[in-house]
Image: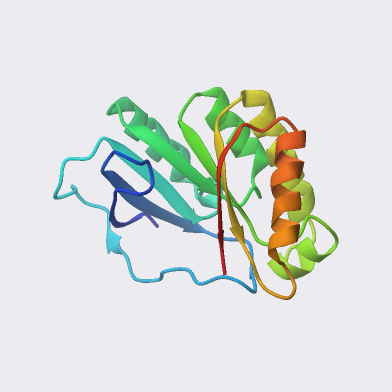
Amino acid sequence: MVRRAGISVCELPGEPCMVIDLHACPFSCLSCRRMREAQPVGKPKVLVSAASIWGCEPLLNPECLPALRELRGMGMRVKLHTSGYAPAPLEEVLAGKLVDVVEVHVRAPLDSRYGEMTGREDALERLFESMWVLASAGTPAFLRIWLLPPLFVERQALEVVHAFESAGVRVEGVGMGC
């Protein structure tokens, strides 16, 4: 399902940005506080030059790639939020230059607890694959790190940033929240 969640001036600083929720989530994260109230997509009431696609793992939604192509066709800048769980579609998106920036949401330390904290055993392996896809493409990335004290704390979040940078990902920003 495609839903517009609103207009933001924070997603791509300096540009009004339509936020589109393509909710498709394979996780059952301990830290999730997803917004469930959203409006069906329609023409925005303000002029926007950018769009931000989110919904935990929008790349699992079959409407995601057509939506990205449509947005690009309209000349919009596009930001994609991802959990890193879908490396193959991410590679297709980056190869097609369908987005300007990717925001990767990391929900646990990069160790054996990742699967436990996301409810998916293969989540960490897929995140690492997505990390390499991002590094290979050279697309700028922001990291959104969801802390969950005492299971996931700031020191471990800094290790996440270091892991992405060591893999060659162009990390252009980091946000941490609880």
In the image, what residue occupies the spot 43% across and 45% down?
63
* Quadrant of the frame with the N terminus: bottom left
In the image, what residue occupies the spot 27% across and 63% down?
39
Residue 135 pos. (x, y %): 68, 29
In the image, what residue occupies the spot 74% across and 47% down?
126
Q: Quadrant of residue 121?
A: bottom right
The answer to whether residue 171 is left or right of residue 19 is right
Pick the residue in front: 163 or 130: 163
Q: Residue furthest front?
A: 155
Q: Count all numbered tags in the image, as a single digit.
A: 0
Residue 73 pos. (x, y %): 32, 26
Residue 150 pos. (x, y %): 73, 76
Pick the residue in front: 42 or 94: 94
In the image, what residue occupies the spot 68% across and 62% down?
154
* Quadrant of the frame with the C terminus: bottom right
Q: Residue furthest left?
A: 45
Residue 20 pos. (x, y %): 36, 51
Q: Does 32 sit above or below residue 104?
A: below
The answer to whether residue 174 is left or right of residue 165 is left
The answer to whether residue 51 is left or right of residue 65 is left
Image color mode: rainbow
Q: Does 99 sit above or below residue 60?
A: above
